Amino acid sequence: MARVWHLTARPDGDLDPGIFTLEDVPDPPLGDDEVRIANSWLSVDPFMRGMLDDHGGYMPALPLGSPMQGGAVGTVIESRARDWPVGRKVLHNGGWRDVAVVAQAACEAIPDSAAPIQRYLGHLGMPGQTAYFGLLDAAAFRPDDLLFVSAAAGAVGSAVVQIARIKGATVIASAGGADKCAALRDWGASIAIDRNAPGTMREKLGAAVRGVGAEGISAFFDNVGGDHLDAAIQHARVGARFALCGMIGGYGRGDQLVLDQPMRLVARRLRIRGFAAPDYDDRWAEFHEDMLRWTLSGDLVSAETVHEGLAAVPAAFCALFTGGNLGKMLVRL
Ligand code: NDP
């Protein structure tokens, strides 16, 4: 039997781990070109929130009663796929369960290196790819940038801050709480903004920009939307480049940004670009080479918040939306 988390109720107000149910599912025999994988680490990610409502949106809606899915790394324990022998470490999308049956075409080999395999769910995986190309391509990064990064202490944001530092930019970063702000400074942010501290985000970003003696930000990597995007528009230089990565401040709430001075977009000649990690799948090797080198050299630090055991998956997922993670949120089996 495999043990698999299913979506059995829709969210109603604040996210509640009780909308998920753990069920025993018979382990099917393998078909041609399939492998059975014992998962060792599971990922929970904000995008999964988009599957839970009945209307879908950013992600297609998951029918009630469906098994949850998500990133996972594990070891092949049975194989009918020529390229995937027993013992091979793989990255795949059969998460939220202890054992998964996956087609070989849907598995990726984890390269042999000194990096821990769970990094392939974080800085060496999808969140790292998001940070790397979102910053360097979508935001058209320049080493002389004054960059603002929101939700900067999480999986994506922590990589953005450090890549920008490695490449020489000045970074203003926001997160929730004093401990997260201390981490942002350790990773190279010149100024850390505590989103939970008194004052509006406009006021806090304005003070940060003045604190580094600048007239405005030249680039923005946005994970939050809402008041963070509003503040960035208010404090942008002419020609500033915005990469819109996500809007977690509004997930499940619908309280997105209302532009109160839209002419600023025109007057400041802002360049605003949304993007998604898969846009860059064909450039994976380029991202992996840089991120692995920085990981192994210690230039790039990967914080992790680890929950233990399959039973902990829903709570770990829900805690993403109350700031319960520093770095990548993971579940270890
Ligand atoms: P994180 O590791 O950053 O975890 C989520 C963090 O968001 C929390 O720890 C919290 O940090 C912050 N947060 C939660 N609720 C709110 C809120 N209401 N207002 C402001 N901040 C909030 O997640 P990821 O790094 O995986 O993802 C970050 C963003 O990137 C998300 O918006 C996600 O959807 C997006 N994303 C987009 C991708 C793409 O392809 N475009 C791919 C991957 C992610 P704190 O306590 O510090 O505020």
Image (tube, grey):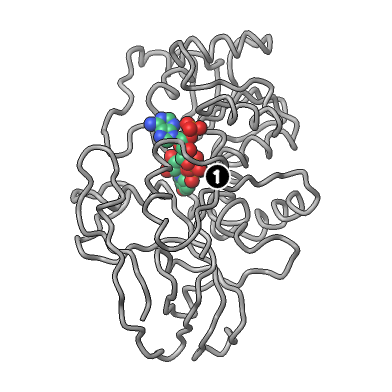
Kindly indicate the quadrant of the structure image that contains residue 286.
Answer: bottom right
Crowding at dot 1, Cα within 10 Å, few <14 / some 14-19 / many 20+, comes out as many
The N terminus sits in image quarter: bottom left
Residue beneath the point at 39% across and 39% down: 321
Q: Is residue 101 above or below residue 333?
A: below
Toward the viewer: 169 or 14? 14
State which quadrant residue 82 falls in: bottom right
Left/right placement of residue 229 relative to residue 131 reads left
Q: Residue 229, how many percent across, how many down?
A: 43, 24
Q: Residue furthest right?
A: 297
Q: Nearer the viewer, residue 137 or 149?
A: 149
Q: Position of residue 71 (x, y in %)?
A: 47, 61
Looking at mark 1, is its residue's CB closer than 8 Å to ligand 1?
yes
Q: Which residue is mark 1?
A: 155
Q: Residue at x 47, y 73 (%)?
A: 106
Tell me the element at label 1.
helix
Whether 209 is drawn above or below 166: the answer is above
Depicted 31 relative to depicted 291: above or below: below
Give the total number of marks visible in the rendering.
1
Residue at 67 percent of width and 57 percent of height? 288
Seen at 29% across and 53% down, the residue is 51
288 or 75, nearer to the observer: 75
The answer to whether residue 288 shows anywhere in this view is yes
Q: Provide residue 66's location: percent of width, then percent of height.
A: 25, 65
Vertical order, 185 against 251 (above or below): above
The residue under label 1 is which amino acid type?
Ala
In the image: residue 143, left or right of residue 24: right
Q: Is residue 273 visible?
A: no
Q: Please indicate whether residue 299 sits to the left or right of residue 215 in the image.
A: right
Residue 127 is situated, as x and y percent measured from the top left of the image, at 54, 49
Quick one: 179 or 247, which is closer to the camera? 179
